[in-house]
Amino acid sequence: MSGSKPIMRLLRLREFPIFQQLQVEERLLRDTQCNWCIINDGTAPPSIVMGISGKPELLLDVRAVIQDQVPVIRRFSGGGTVIVNSDTVFVTIICNRDAVPNLSLYPHPIMRWTEQLYAPVFEGVPGFQLREHDYVLGSLKFGGNAQSIIKNRWLHHTSFLWDYDNIQMQYLKLPSKAPSYRLARPHGDFICRLKDYLPSRDLFLQTIVSALQVHFIVQGSTIDDTGQNMPSKSPRTTKILTSVQLDSFLTDCNPKV
């Protein structure tokens, strides 16, 4: 702690592979005691990211994913399924229990606190709110969230849609457990692009940092500071699904008679 605010280490990345980012997140959550924020401005190559319990055969057009060789990542945290690319902005907050005063370490209170954190970022943009587990403008989703909570630490990961590719969205099926406000709308009628509402991507990123500075003393860090190449103290659960594994899900969808 320094003064009245806790210290938060800020790691700024650009087009860092999302698989490696998730590995870094898992390490920082489990193996460090610092507060962290990771901002990754885009990622390459385009990839599909699923929650730890996601079932590809129910969430993806598995045949198209295999044919187009799209990487499929099963992350260590919960949350839904997204396809991400260079137009996705990732922000992950990792904190100790006492970093946010009076915050209960349960999903809904953490979500509500992040809504307050991001409110200044969208000042002047009508309709910003947390709706169920998503950030929305009115009834249109622009941010999906995933969380992981352990004994004295928590992680909140957001994928912000600065822009998206309609064709890539076709890899995703309409999930059976969709938010009620979705009303079975296809992706194109359910999500929106932040670039249509905010003046610039750089300003968006800077206002996120400014919002963090209200609550934390923000200190810059580098990828080397994360110890990503150090031996792990605990098992890692973020994995890339192999083509063989994906093919098995396809086979399960089409059993032989």
Image (cartoon, rainbow, N blue to C red):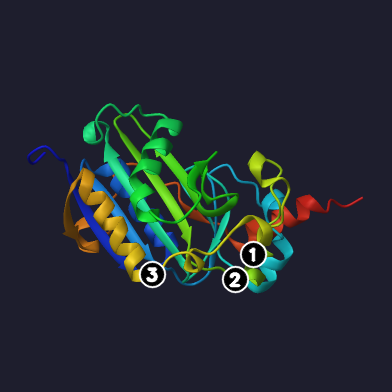
Rendered location of residue 49, percent (x, y): 53, 56
Q: Residues within 10 Å of mark 2 (few under 14, many from 20)?
A: few
- The numbered disc on residue 169 is 1
| 141 over 104 or under it: above or below | below
Rendered location of residue 232, percent (x, y): 30, 48
Marks 1/3: CA–CA distance = 21 Å
Marks 1/2: CA–CA distance = 6 Å
Residue type pointed to by label 2: Asp
Q: Earlier in the sequence, mark 2 or mark 3?
A: 2
| Residue 5 visible from this viewpoint | yes
> Element under label 3?
helix
Mark 1 touching mark 2, by CB under 8 A?
Answer: yes
| 219 over 114 or under it: above or below | below
Residue, x 57% and y 47% (percent of image)? 80
Q: Quadrant of residue 103?
A: top left
Q: Is residue 94 left or right of 162 when viewed as pictured?
A: left
Quickly name the residue at label 2. Answer: 165
Q: Earlier in the sequence, mark 1 or mark 3?
A: 1
Rendered location of residue 79, percent (x, y): 53, 44
- The numbered disc on residue 209 is none
Residue type pointed to by label 3: Arg
Rendered location of residue 13, percent (x, y): 31, 66
* Pick the front one: 129 or 151: 129
Residue type pointed to by label 1: Met
Quickly name the residue at label 3. Answer: 201
Query: Which image quarter is the N terminus in?
Result: top left
Q: How many marks?
A: 3
Mark 2 touching mark 3, by CB under 8 A?
Answer: no
Residue, x 53% and y 69% (percent of image)? 46
Q: Residues within 10 Å of mark 3 (few under 14, many from 20)?
A: some
Q: Quadrant of residue 106?
A: top left
Residue, x 52% and y 50% (percent of image)? 136
